[in-house]
Amino acid sequence: MNRYILFPVLALTLTLASCDMDKNPYNAIPEDEALMTPTDFKNMSVPLYTGMRSFVGSSYFCTGPDEQSDDFNATTGAGISDLHRWDFNASLRSGDALYASCQSMIASANFIIDGYNKCDMSNKSLFTDEAMATVRNVKGEAFFTRAYFLFNLAQFFCADYDESNADEKNSGVSYRTDYYPSSDASTYPGRKTLRETYKQITDDLDSALLYVNVSGEQSSYYITIDAVKAVKARVALAMDDYPTAAELAAEVIGTGTYTLAGSADRLNQMWAGNFDTESIFKLSASKSDQLASQTGLQYLPYTSGGMPSYVPTQTAIDLYSDNDYRKSVFFTPITFQTSTGVVGNVLAFNKYPEEAYPYQATGGSYDYARFTIEPKLIRISEMYLIAAEAYAMSGDLRNASQYLNDFKAKRIAGYQTQSFSSVDRIMTEIQNERHREFIGEGMRLLDLKRWNLGVTRGTPQQEDICAMPGADYSTGLSVPAGDYHFVWPIPTHEMDTNPKMVQNSGY
């Protein structure tokens, strides 16, 4: 039976409408003919970027984890999601979408890597030196993509990496490293260990560094050498490999290519405009067919006077001093009235503004461009905070303090350099800075899991606009460290179709 590849996005499994499997389905070509020329490889890299844009800009990746954590209260206008209540099960829709997206992108990467290894490149008039540089770079992009999505599967669907659990059976991710779509369930892979999973991630990133040949630049829309190193630093921190995390983060900072925004105007331009000196790698979204999700719809009213689904807690807002540039950029005052007549006067979350750059770039009238930004996969601010944490956890308070102070000086007007006398003291401030910097980006839940901290939902700005105020599944929620919901369940569909799959504890 012939196997086909569908365009424009590779599917994890190929579902063909025709019962005659020997006929090419619409918009498909045989798999063994898909990657035969340099142009084929270049074209096949496009789904990697469109898939990353959809993923990084999605509500299930950005807002889902933040619904679950401590920074936002659900309003009466939205009700309380299962993530917000912490009572979800294997039917969790956010988990299903995130899992399927990651596995599909891994399959896309596998297709390119396999295609490269099988392609006859002996025709040097076709595969010139210049063409080979492009083809090799595409293979590097595929290695980066596979590593990035494997890492996200491990982050959400596995326990935090630790030497004490790294070799536990079925503790890691189920994945393949070849492209082999099949309806035969006996071929579906079981779960690896955490150590095996993270070794695959780090090996793939090492391979990406061998093949990616694009130098880093500010706000790159393409995978670069710096982007690979930055994600390697993120992975190393998740593995408690502090020397590697510190070295890589410091190396990316040391290029001098990326500069921290040092004013409220510059920060606002980074999120609402298109002047961004911090992004190491982000995804283009300047056309109507390139848009990410309307992430801001969770946090901002769709129409004037409307009520958002979630508002920041007062506890989260109080993390920012009045001198902190982020306070005026990340939060904006709104007024609305609930269905019961209660008037809400609160600060709304404004990191995904209604009329940001994609809205402006698409003409200022395209409705689906509202509340969207160009998704930022990794920024230099994260490198400063990774370096600070990794040096601190290595006992190097001097370097940890330097990176933390350098970062804070660009975020806070009139900041005075601080000294830190202990690892505990500086780690508290690093944790607070990660909290401030990455609010609303889906990172808070993963940080709490990594630090083995519980979730205590913050005090509401205005309790009478909140859904079920005071309830232990709403504004009064308090969850201890280690609760099994910190690890999302393997989706029901995956459990039903893969006989080797093992569900996470508690589900």
Image: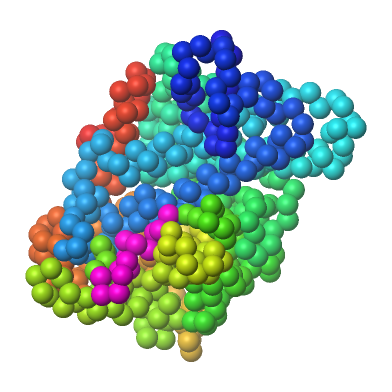
Q: Residue at coordinates 21% horizontally, 59% vertically from top-left?
A: 78
Instruction: Say left or right for 352 vs 208.
Output: left
The picture places residue 57, in percent across and down from the top left corner, at 46, 54
User: What colouring does the structure picture have?
Assistant: rainbow
Q: Please, is residue 266 above or below residue 109 in the view?
A: below
Can residue 144 be seen here? no
Q: Nearer the viewer, residue 481 or 227?
A: 227
Left or right of 250 on screen, residue 416: left
Question: Which residue occupies the foreground of this view, 339 or 49?
Answer: 339
- Classify residue 25 by image quadrant: top right
| Quadrant of the snapshot with the N terminus | top right
Q: Please name the residue shown 46% across and 34% down the image.
A: 103
Q: Main secondary structure of the magenta part?
A: loop
Residue 316 lies, in percent from the top left, at 30, 71
7 or 462, nearer to the observer: 7
At a point 10% along the width and 74% down the height, the residue shown is: 341
Locate residue 261, reporting x and y percent: 55, 76
Residue 261 is left or right of residue 438, and the answer is right
User: Does residue 321 appear anywhere in the picture?
Assistant: yes
Q: Residue at x 64, y 50 (%)?
A: 223
Membership of 258 in magenta stretch: no
Q: Is residue 330 above or below residue 478?
A: below
Q: Nearer the viewer, residue 422 or 184?
A: 184
**Residue found at the very far right of the displayed protein:** 125
Q: Position of residue 439 (x, y in %)?
A: 38, 65
Give the answer, above or below, for where 302 lies relative to 445.
below
Q: Is residue 301 magenta?
A: yes
Quadrant, the C terminus: top left
State the extent of the magenta-drawn residues as a range. 293-306
